[in-house]
Image (cartoon, helix red, strand yellow):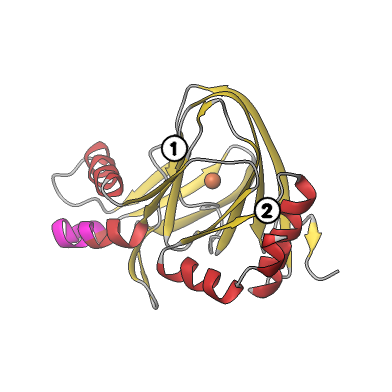
Amino acid sequence: MLAATHNFADLVEDLDVRGYALIRTAADFGALTAAAERFGAHVGSASMGARLLEAQDSPDWLPRHTEQLDDIEPLQYFALGCLESAVSGGATCLYDGRLAASALVDTHPELVKVQITYATPWRPTIATHPLIVFDRDHGPVLRYRSALETNTVDGPLPPGITEAQMYGLVEAAVSVAVAVVHRWRPGDLLIVNNRVMIHARQPFVGTRRMVRYRFDDPHFKTVIIGQ
Ligand SMILES: [Fe+2]
């Protein structure tokens, strides 16, 4: 099987440089999960949480976001596996948070002081993050979720810039940092470096069946890796 022989060293380099990597395997839960687990073992993850995501006809975009911003330290990696692609739409869009952050630092350096507190409707955890994180390996990186009622801007916003304008500036920077529009095929396992990339999902028509894997999620462990 392809996934079994994948060169994980190249794949980890892809995740570091490009921010994402793709494995092709069989389009069933067992094969996708086995491939995700092999990746997790390679990068030293102790556990992963697998969740089936099945939905029908979604007319809305999933807002752009860094995964799990309600935790102090967002996950480093998550992966999406495809069991069944939608009839149309449903692509996962990845944006390079390094590119978006660099553009914002150049044009609106005062935005580096902005902090946003993120909550979710489904968990009591909340966390505050700088809009732009200065990562040791990657430099400035955007850590972000589009405006939702569970976002609270803690400021300080630059003088003369409203919250709506701030979101507008960030969305524009994210829009020009699009790295890939990943159109799904059953058997795709797309791994994302969540510390550098922001993701979103197109509207879609038809049934879309995916599996999401979170590596080292402290709240959700369905697979203990290596056991
Ligand atoms: Fe997500």
Q: Is residue 213 left or right of residue 101?
A: right
Residue under numbered circle 1: 63
Residue 105: x and y, percent?
A: 21, 62
Instruction: Give the crowd class for mark 1: few <14, some 14-19, many >=20 residues within 10 Å.
Output: some
| Number of residues whose C-alpha sits closer than 10 Å to that of mark 2, classed few (under 14), some (14–19) or many (20 or more) | many
Task: Inspect the image, locate mark 2, and give the three-letter code of the amino acid beneath it.
Answer: Thr
Instruction: Give the residue at x 64% y 39%.
Output: 122
Q: Nearest the camera: 72 or 214?
A: 214
Say which of marks 2 and 1 sits in front: 2
The structure residue drawn at horizontal position 29% and vertical position 60%, both measured from the top left corner, is 99
Q: Which span of residues is magenta-colored?
A: 103-111
Question: Which of the pair 3/119 is nearer the observer?
Answer: 3
SS at badge 1: strand
User: Whole-percent x and y of residue 163?
Assistant: 27, 40
- For this orientation, the residue located farthest to the front is 1
From the top left corner, tell me how far across and down residue 100 is, in percent.
28, 56
Residue 107 covered by magenta stretch: yes
* CA distance separating discs 2 and 1: 28 Å
- What amino acid is found at the position of numbered circle 1 in the picture? Pro
Residue position marked by numbered label 2 in the rendering: 25
Residue 152: where, in percent of width, then height?
41, 44
Residue 150 seen anywhere in this rendered image of the structure: yes
